[in-house]
Image (cartoon, helix red, strand yellow):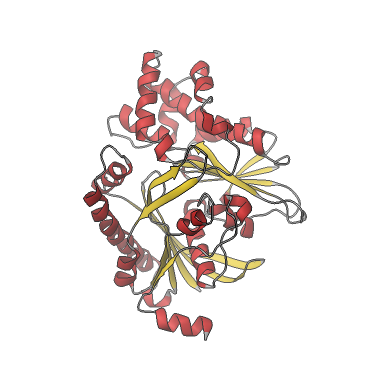
Amino acid sequence: MIVIGLMSGTSADGVDVAICDIRGHPGDMRVELLCGAAFAYEREMRERILASCDPKSSRVHQIADLHVDLASVFADCTIAALDQAGMSAGQVDLIGSHGQTLWHNVLPSGQVNVSFQVVEAAVLAERTGITAISNFRARDIAAGGQGAPLTSFVDWLLLRHPTHWRAVQNIGGMGNVTFLPPLSDEASAPIAFDTGPGNALLDIAVTQISRGAMTYDRDSHYARQGRVNEEWLEALLGHPYYERDYPKTTGRETFGTAAALSLISEARSRGLENAEIIATLTALTASNIADAYRRFAPAPIREVILGGGGRHNPVMVGMLSELLAPANVLTHEDIGMDSDFKEALVFAVLAYETWHNRPATLPVLTGARRASVLGSITPGANYVDLLRSTWL
């Protein structure tokens, strides 16, 4: 099947589109990325998304408008990616859309009771004519799970090493890890959870410090100039999230705009300069990842496969290489996968599994009572033909 995956992450930078050829089934699945395309949000749209994530600034009518308007952006991006690939919508079977997370609510107990993503699938199906699958997290949460990290299921399907343990570490707005046992180990189970803030605190701080001239620390511009304040870093690593046992997830509700602005204020009260603030927040991400490995890795990790925007931050990658030694820190490209479109590819695979009525989680990864078929199906113009070709 030809399946398109659409992803907009916690950082709300833009839409990633992965056009994939997917064949087979779990245990014998082949996924080929035919084309990947990335589309940055216009400044106004990004501001609308971030404002809607903030309980102090969000309004129900604005969220409702965003739900539809952002779907139009997703549809435009889908059509543009197909044009880039020299393909038509008629060649595509399914769209798997993650949407844009506005709220991921973790209760004091650590249980997640809701994860809310916008992007109206009906608009996608109507604009493209392609059957769309969306709202992937809700069913896992209904079954008692965290609704995340969903990428870990695809890591389990596609990225296990024949003989040694791997960690697949994503650094997006939040960081998340999957500890994968080797294919030769039939007894051990994978482990997955959010390690803590990835780029979210860092990006907000850079935006504030640069007065909007930069939205992230490109090429570690600030981090290279500053020294890590070890005293402040130690205090930051005392956040109770890091000690909480897995399965666990987090988001902007804990490590978002309000937290970042508070940290900037605290840093300045400590007398830190701008570059020191960014260097220390960069070290916070690298350190909370390394701390998670020390606390929770079930076996020595030989390889760390790094993905997400954080892999483009040379200071952060250098810190990780040092903190995670002797593990070898690699990128997805080193094992034949495009890092930039990994998460979009994941939602193509999840849509493929949903269409085939197969669970797309492992309870051990999310803490759910049982594995569930994920997502909601919105028929497109191709729906009847798709049913006939797949099931009849």
Q: Position of residue 213 (x, y in %)?
A: 29, 34
In this view, 67 is above or below 49 = below
Q: Is residue 42 left or right of residue 287?
A: left
Residue at 40% x, 19% y is: 267
Residue at 40% x, 39% y is: 252
In this view, 61 is above or below 195 = below
Q: Is residue 238 left or right of residue 68?
A: right
Residue at 63% x, 60% y is: 157
Nearest to the observer: residue 150 or residue 35: 150
Residue 94 image-quadrant placement: bottom left
In this view, 112 is above or below 314 = below
Nearest to the observer: residue 42 or residue 244: 244
Q: Position of residue 37 (x, y in %)?
A: 40, 58
Q: Is residue 80 visible?
A: yes
Q: Is residue 149 left or right of residue 201?
A: right
Residue at 51% x, 16% y is: 231
Q: Position of residue 118 (x, y in %)?
A: 34, 55
Q: Which residue is at the far front?
A: 109
